[in-house]
Image (cartoon, grey):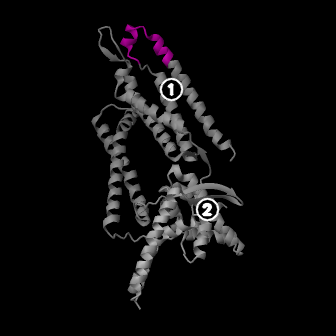
Amino acid sequence: MADKDSLVKNLKLELRKGTLVIAVLSQLVTKHYGYSLVETLNSNGLFIDQNTLYQLLRRLDKNGLLESTWEVIEPRPRKYYQLSELGKEVLIELKKDIMHNFNVITTLLKEVT
Amino acid sequence: MELLNKYLYQVGRHLPTKDKEDTINELQSIILDQLDIKLQEGIAEETALVAILTELGDPRSVAFRYRNMTPLLKRELEQVLWQVIKVPAIIIPLVLILIRTIEFVSGTSNYTIMDVLLQWAYEIPSILTTVIVVMGLIFFIFLILDRYTDVDFNEVAFTFDPKKLPALPKKVFKASIGESTITIIGSVVMLYVLNFDQGLIAINDLNGIKRGLLNDNFNNILPFLNLNIMLGMGIAIFHLIKRRKNKVSKTAEFIQSMFGAFVLFYLASNNIFDATLVADHNLTFLKVGFRVILYIAAVAAVLSAIITYVKMFLDKD
C-alpha cells in the first residue's frame, strides 16, 4: 500500500509540474507580488509552496516572460511581477496546447470507470 | 527583528554579489508579508517568525533555490568535508616546514635565525601549492562519493532551526572595488618586476653589459617583500569577492601593513644597490634618495595602519 501511495504521490507531482507554469502565467496578466500570487492561486484550489513559486517566478523573469518592478505601496516595498509581451504570446500558445490536451485526455478518460 | 536579519545575512552569504541585494530585499518583503498575516491571527511575533523561517528552510538551500542551482555537495557531506580538510591545511605546512628546517640545519654549519626564517619564506610558494592541491583532491574525492556512492558518514541529518542561526557579524565595512583592483594589479606587476624580470631594474655597466641595479642584500629581503605583496593581494582579492570588510580582514590588513612597514625599514637600513654601478654612473643620489623615500614610506605605512585600525573601533554603527 505504501508503495502505491508514494507512486501516486510522485505521479501527481509530475502532473502538477506541467500545469504550474501556465497557472502562474495566467494570473500574471494582472500585476501581483509574490505573496498575493500565492493567495490567489490557493483561493483557486492550486496550493503551491512559496519556495517553488519564487523559484518559478525568478526563472520566468530571467527567461523574459515576466517584467518585474519594485513598488513602494504601504506598508513596504514589494517586487511586482506581470507578463511581458513575450509572456503574453507564450501564454496564448500554452493555453491552446493545454486546452487541446485537456480535450484529448477527457475523451480518453471517458472509457475509464 | 534580529532573527530575520540573521536569516537574511546567512542567505546572502550564498548568493552571487550581482543579485544579492535584490534577492534579499524580495525575500525580506515575502517574509514580512507572511508575518503580517500571522500577527493578524494573533500569533506572537517570534513564534510566527520561527514558523515562517522553518517553512522556508535553511538559508543555504533557499539561496541555491533562488539561484536555480543545487549545491555541489549534500549538506551532510559538506560538514564532513570541512572537518576533514582542516587536517591537511594544518599538518602539511607544519610537516614541510619541519622537514625543510631539519634539512637546512643539518646541511649548514653556520646559520642564523634570519637564515632559517629566509628558508621558511622560500618554502611558502611550494607549501601553498601542496596544500591547495591536496585540498582540491579531497574535494574531488568527496564529489565522487556524493555523485556515485551512497556513503554514510553517520552524520545526523541536518534539521534547520532558525533559533540556532549564528549571530550577525559585529561590524561590516564597505570595500572599495577600485582600491582592491588597483592593489591586485599593482601586486601582480610588482611580483613580476621584482622576481621574473629584474632586467627592468637594470642598467649597462661601463663595459656595456646590462646588470641588475639591486644587489644581494635586496635578494635576501625579497622573500619577505614577496610575502607582504602576496598577503596584500590575498586580502584585496577577499575584499573584491566579498565586497565588504570585517574586523578580521581589517586586522589582517593591519598586520600586513605593519609587516610591510618592517620590510620597508629593513630595505631602507640596508644598501640594496649594486655599489659598482652606483659608483660608475654617479648614482649616489639614488641611494640616498631611495633610503629617505623608504623611511618616509615606512613611517607613513605605520601611522596610516594604526589610524585606520583604531578608527574601526571608534566609528559608531
Disc 1 packing (10 Å; few <14; some 14–19; many ≥20): some
Residue at the limit of the structure toward the left, as seen here: B107
Q: Is residue A96 magenta?
A: no
Residue B82 sits above or below residue B218 on the image: below
Rendering coords of residue B6 (x, y %): 60, 59
Rendering coords of residue B210 (x, y %): 31, 15
Q: Amino acid at mark 1?
A: Phe
Mark 2, residue position: A31
Rendering coords of residue B119 (x, y %): 35, 36
Q: Residue at x 39, y 9 (%)?
A: B279
Mark 1, residue position: B265
Residue B281 in view, yes or no: yes
Task: Report helix, strand or loop for mark 2.
Answer: loop
Q: Amino acid at mark 2?
A: Lys
In the rendered structure, which segment of residues is drawn in magenta?
Answer: B273-290
> Closer to the camera, B76 or B59?
B59
